[in-house]
Amino acid sequence: MNTATIWRTTLERLEHASLDATSKVWLQEAHLTNISDGESPGNSLYLELQVPHEIAKDVINTRWRPTIEEALQEVTGLPVTLTVRLPADERTADTRTRGSTASFEQPPADEPAKKNGYSFYTMRKPAQQAEPRYETPPLEEWDNEQRANILMHNRLNPRYTFETFIVGNSNRLAHAASLAVAEAPGESYNPLFLYGGVGLGKTHLLHAIGHQGVRTGLAVLYVSSEQFTNEIINAIRYRTTEEFRAKYRSVDILLVDDIQFIAGKESTEEEFFHTFNSLHEMSKQIVICSDRPPKAIVSLEERLRSRFEWGLIADIQPPDLETRMAILRAKAEMLRYRVPDEVIAYIASRVQTNIRELEGCLNRLIAYQQLHRTELTLDIARAAMSSLDSDQREMQLSGQQIAQAVAHFYHVSFEAMCSKQRDKFIVKPRQVAMYLVRHETQTSLLEIGQLFGGRDHSTVLYACEKIEKALKNNSTLRQEIEAIREQLLRD
Ligand SMILES: Nc1ncnc2c1ncn2[C@@H]1O[C@H](COP(=O)(O)OP(=O)(O)OP(=O)(O)O)[C@@H](O)[C@H]1O
């Protein structure tokens, strides 16, 4: 089987895969052009797919490569490693990997290069100068809006816009700052760093900025730090770091969610640092979200932390009752569901810290009411919520679990927290853990003291009071405790 046949058969298979129509068209125009012997271990095949232009490369590389590799594997019966390339990439890629230029040529019909029974186009030294076979327009020449749409590739949730975001005291600053950067990206606050507890609207605001950017024809890229990390790993693995960099450095607005997860991942931090610098130098907008302020992201490199603090840091606090009610009303309206005011007030008074949970309660209530085919009254709401409460009671946390979570958060051991050590970096986690156990469980002061290495109940009381007092004016501590709580709920 030659590469043309393999590719034709693979395309037939891909017809039934969940690829979008545009990508399928690009794949029809693509060529499977090369295998380089000895580059891949064992029996695996090392193939290159030449795609028509930069955008196709970007999308196929980031979204569809594993699917295509799988299909190729089914067709060839061998594990496949695929590199997606532009025809114009040949020279740079080859220089990078082999230190010499080469072009892809079809071998004469009588001497096909063979590997495991397959014949492929082979790598040849160029006779003279290797000219790119066909020109592709540079990224900048692409129509911006088209580029933006493709780059974000359905990653923005259409529901998360400024229009659907309810503003209250708890999120006013974050909302105003987001609006300002959406209206004048790169000009007002750069970077904008949004932080707050789980389910308080950080992602919603990021997407809202993204939508506005796309509307004004800018290239917007939204990624979670997890996706960013995965892309780096893949780029290193497939030696496509230049493409990775080109992609990230060509955007007008970069939106990064949950940045706290890059802390401690050395090469991700390194790459993000350079991405940040080049975008910032070009006055491109960067917006970052986290569950805590930069200072509280333990083990984040100092140079990154200080950059995060360059622009504006805006927090989002849990919404007050009025805002919670306004959010519920808006959600009910969106679902075209009439919910009496007293029911809205009731739900809003029950769920205080997480808007996702607030929405969940409303959905649950609607489902409960439809199931029982009754009118939505306060009594029905109470009944639905009490069944929810009993679910939650079953998930009660133990003091030990809480202490472990605190130890993990502050990077100390549980044993150290139970020891006699009085160093500051142990005392704080110990006191936070005591405070949380006291507030999240029914454990008595005496029992908490025993849990932490047989301490006196007055020590526990002192720790709880100290943390309570500190929480009044120490927003970093508030965020840390909120983050630990949320982590516990997630686990
Ligand atoms: N002010 C608001 N107005 C309307 N809806 C909101 C508001 N804040 C949050 N929401 C809704 O609450 C849900 C959770 O919000 P979002 O995902 O943005 O939270 P988050 O802070 O990013 O949480 P996480 O830390 O878990 O990622 C979403 O459905 C969002 O639309």
Image: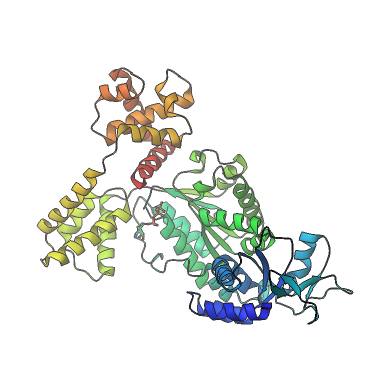
- Residue 15 x, y percent position in the rendering: 51, 80
Q: Quadrant of the C terminus?
A: top left
Specify the color scheme. rainbow
Report the residue that reaches farthest toward the front. 117
- Residue 265 x, y percent position in the rendering: 57, 45
Q: Which residue is more in the foreground, 24 or 257?
A: 24
Locate ligand 1 by image quadrant: bottom left
Vertical arrangement, residue 228 with respect to residue 296, above or below:
below
In this view of the protein, can residue 469 be seen by the observer?
A: no
Vertical arrangement, residue 290 with respect to residue 176, above or below:
above
| Residue 334, image quadrant | bottom left
Relative side of 151 to 125, left or right:
left
Give the tally of numbered discs: 0
- Residue 20 x, y percent position in the rendering: 50, 76
Q: Which residue is more in the foreground, 278 or 178?
A: 278
Residue at 61% across, 44% down: 266
Q: Quadrant of the N terminus?
A: bottom right
Relative side of 313 to 316, left or right:
right
- Residue 243 x, y percent position in the rendering: 67, 63
Residue at 42% across, 39% down: 480
Vertical arrangement, residue 479 with respect to residue 373, above or below:
above
Q: Which residue is more in the foreground, 177 or 400?
A: 400
Relative side of 334 to 162, left or right:
left
Residue at 45% across, 25% down: 426
Relative side of 187 to 413, left or right:
right
Vertical arrangement, residue 401 with respect to residue 242, above or below:
above
In this view of the protein, can residue 300 be seen by the observer?
A: yes
